């Protein structure tokens, strides 16, 4: 069973390189350059030393980047487990392994990394995740604690589903959770890491949160 780390990225810094250096040879690594400015080419030149790099010129969004990686994986591999990690240093390979180990014994499940919110968590992250969690539960009657976790793992058995989900930006990851049908979700505790009070995140808290709230409300209105 091949283990694959997939990392979507947009204008990353050296934390992406540090993450790549921490991943051992038991994983194949794929990095997506989601239309970064050319001034980041020096970082992507270094990325090529550790990973297979897929690049395109226009910034299309995280969901689009993930699905570009999924298409490549589906074409290249047969039996595999994919674990997605963010490029900003918030995920550890040790935690990614926990998700992969779980999926290796539960091939039809989706595993999510579950962060714990405390006083050290940036306030906007605590509030945003709390509101999305409540809205998600009200809309779906299902309970997922960390709906916005980017650390996720699944096997080839879920690949067609992951490719069928709509959305090209941060809406994609929420749509994955809204349209699960009979797919089981299992959350696994992971370390919560934030740098610079999470100010470097490409997630636009107000605008992207509004879009996610709208998606959940639309889902609820269509499933009454």
Image (spheres, rainbow, N blue to C red):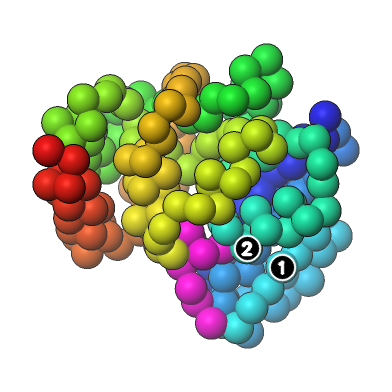
Position of the N terminus by quadrant: top right
Q: Secondary structure at mark 1?
A: strand
Contact, mark 1 vs mark 2 (Cβ under 8 Å): yes
Question: Residue 147 bears which disc, if any?
Answer: none
Instruction: Classify 170 as above or below 98.
Output: below
Give the residue displayed 31% in from the left and 26% down from the top: 145
- Could you say where residue 69 lies in the image, as x and y percent from the top left? 66, 57
Is 60 contained in the magenta span?
Answer: yes
Circle 1 crowding by C-alpha within 10 Å: few under 14, some 14–19, many from 20: some
Position of 130 with respect to 163 (left or right) is left
Nearest to the observer: residue 91 or residue 160: 160
- Distance between the alpha carbons at the discs numbered 1 and 2: 8 Å
Question: Residue 68 bears which disc, if any?
Answer: 2
Q: Is residue 162 visible?
A: yes
Nearest to the observer: residue 182 or residue 97: 182
Give the residue displayed 75% in from the left and 65% down from the top: 53
- Could you say where residue 192 lies in the image, as x and y percent from the top left? 44, 31
Q: Is residue 16 visible?
A: no
Of labels 1 and 2, earlier in sequence is 1
Outermost residue toward the top in this view? 105
Q: Which residue is mark 1?
A: 54
| Quadrant in the picture for residue 108 | top right
Give the residue displayed 69% in from the left and 78% down from the top: 41
In the image, which residues are magenta?
Answer: 58-65
Circle 2 crowding by C-alpha within 10 Å: few under 14, some 14–19, many from 20: some
Instruction: Classify 13 as above or below 176.
Output: below
Give the residue displayed 28% in from the left and 23% down from the top: 143
Nearest to the observer: residue 63 or residue 224: 224
Position of the C terminus by quadrant: top left
């Amino acid at each position: 069973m091949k283990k694959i780390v997939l990392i979507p990225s947009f204008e990353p810094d050296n934390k992406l390189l540090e993450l790549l250096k921490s991943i051992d040879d038991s994983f194949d690594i794929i990095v997506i350059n989601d239309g970064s400015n050319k001034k980041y080419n020096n970082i992507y030149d270094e990325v090529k030393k550790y990973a297979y790099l897929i690049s395109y010129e226009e910034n299309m969004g995280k969901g689009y980047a993930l699905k570009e990686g999924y298409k490549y994986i589906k074409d290249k591999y047969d039996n595999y487990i994919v674990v997605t990690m963010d490029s900003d240093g918030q995920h550890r390979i040790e935690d990614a392994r926990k998700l992969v180990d779980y999926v290796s014994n539960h091939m039809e499940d989706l595993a999510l990394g579950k962060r714990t919110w405390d006083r050290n968590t940036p306030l906007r992250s605590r509030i945003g995740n709390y509101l999305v969690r409540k809205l998600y539960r009200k809309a779906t009657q299902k309970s997922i604690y960390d709906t916005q976790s980017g650390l996720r793992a699944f096997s080839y058995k879920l690949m067609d589903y992951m490719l069928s989900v709509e959305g090209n930006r941060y809406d994609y990851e929420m749509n994955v959770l809204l349209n699960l049908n009979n797919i089981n979700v299992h959350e696994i505790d992971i370390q919560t890491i934030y740098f610079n009070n999470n100010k470097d995140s490409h997630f636009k808290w107000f605008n992207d949160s509004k879009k996610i709230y709208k998606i959940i409300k639309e889902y609820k209105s269509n499933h009454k």
